[in-house]
Amino acid sequence: MEICISSTGLYLPPRIQSSAELSGLIGRSEEWIVSRTGVRERRVAEEGMEFLAAKAALAAIGDGPRPDCIINASLTPVQLIPDSAVFVQKALGWEGVPCWSVHATCLSFVVALLNASGLIQAGIYRSVLVVSAEAGTPWRNLEQPESAALFGDGAAAALLEQSKGESAVKDWIMYTWPEGSEFTEFRGCGTRRPPGHPDTRHDDNLFNMQGPKVFRMVLMHISRVLRTLFERNDMTFDDIDLFILHQASGPGMEAFVKLGFPREKIVNIVADYGNCVAASIPMTLAIANEQGRLRRGDRVLIGGTGAGLSIAFALLQW
């Protein structure tokens, strides 16, 4: 699909929470946190996700016209109803722009990228703004120190338009293994653990993760996913110019290197921002763009893992 990411935007909440500060909340030392998660510090939002999203969106658009459509690709909702995309548009001060959400946990941006590309390719819209924002640090389960130490807040956006050159979404791949559904979960506020139900507990409304089980399951499947993508495009790791990956954790980023990803081509921001869930991938993309690491014509692989368990990658010609 001949689609171009014409601009990106980034917003980082000003409050920085170091691992030294967090150590007092979870009963673990700073050294323990950094050794287990690879995260030295993370941002903590003091406003709703819609305001983070709006600031990232404006950074992406600049002085340009409003997009034809907004896709909110986030995990953290403002509330269950109405859809959070409505609140993002409200925070922007706009009206009349069609908007909706794509929710695929940490892979939301990658899935939204495919959706937006299809809409543009079909001629339905000329420009689509994809925005991801997370303000989920209040949902950290402090009784689970390792997962609580992973997460941070932030937002990023990307403006997609019809390509006028060689830029394109060259390929896309995704697999899901639902046997991993209980390894990373937020049980509350749904039919499984509704408010007022006798089985509903306080920690049903907090993030719960069994990190080692997730890690093992990813290693079981990810090589096959990558091999399938590379074989059908007649390419190897060496043919990719830059890797924009979900920043799951420090050990997770090291696992990519062990799988064959060239370290020097991986954009790694996890130590400074932690795991920002759905905002992780577009934040990494926006930071790489700000640093001048993306050049037109580059082959870029975007993707990683998400709760479910899902693995997805998009192959772009930047």
Image: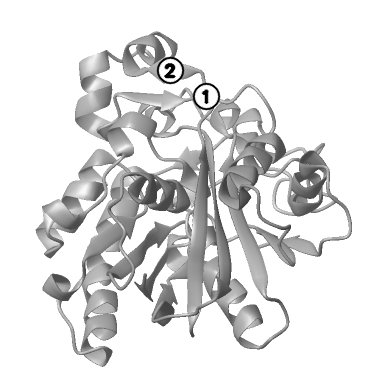
Left or right of 168, for residue 195: right
In this picture, is 39 found above or below 160? Answer: above
Q: Is residue 163 left or right of residue 267?
A: right
Q: Check if mark 2's residue and mark 1's residue have beta carbons within 8 Å.
A: yes
Instruction: For label 2, count other residues whose C-alpha is less than 10 Å away and answer few (under 14), some (14-19) or many (20+).
Output: some
Question: Which residue sits at x=49%, y=40%?
Answer: 208
- Residue of label 2: 17
Image spot of residue 263 (x, y percent): 13, 53
* Residue positioned 31% across, 44% down in the render: 291
Give the amino acid type for the residue marked by disc 2 in the picture: Gln
Please tell me which residue is depicted at 70% across the width and 44% down the height of the picture. 77
Q: Give the secondary structure at mark 1.
A: loop
Q: Is 58 or 102 nearer to us in this picture? A: 58
Question: Could you tell me residue 91's position as x and y percent?
Answer: 78, 39
Residue at x 17% of width, y 48% of height? 254
Badge 1 amino acid: Val
Give the camera-side residue of 199 and 116.
116
User: Can you say whether 183 is above or below 169 in the image?
Assistant: above
Quarter of the image where one finds residue 236: bottom left
For label 1, the residue is 44
Q: Is residue 74 visible?
A: no
Instruction: From the top left corner, tell me how far across and down residue 223 is, in percent.
Output: 21, 72
Q: Nearer the viewer, residue 81 or 217?
A: 81
Q: Is residue 266 above or below residue 58?
A: below
Residue 97 location, x and y as percent? 82, 61
Where 74 sits versus 272, above or below? below
Closest to the observer, 285 or 165: 165
Residue 164 visible? The answer is: yes
Q: What is the distance, in whole Å, between disc 2 and disc 1 at their CAs?
A: 7 Å
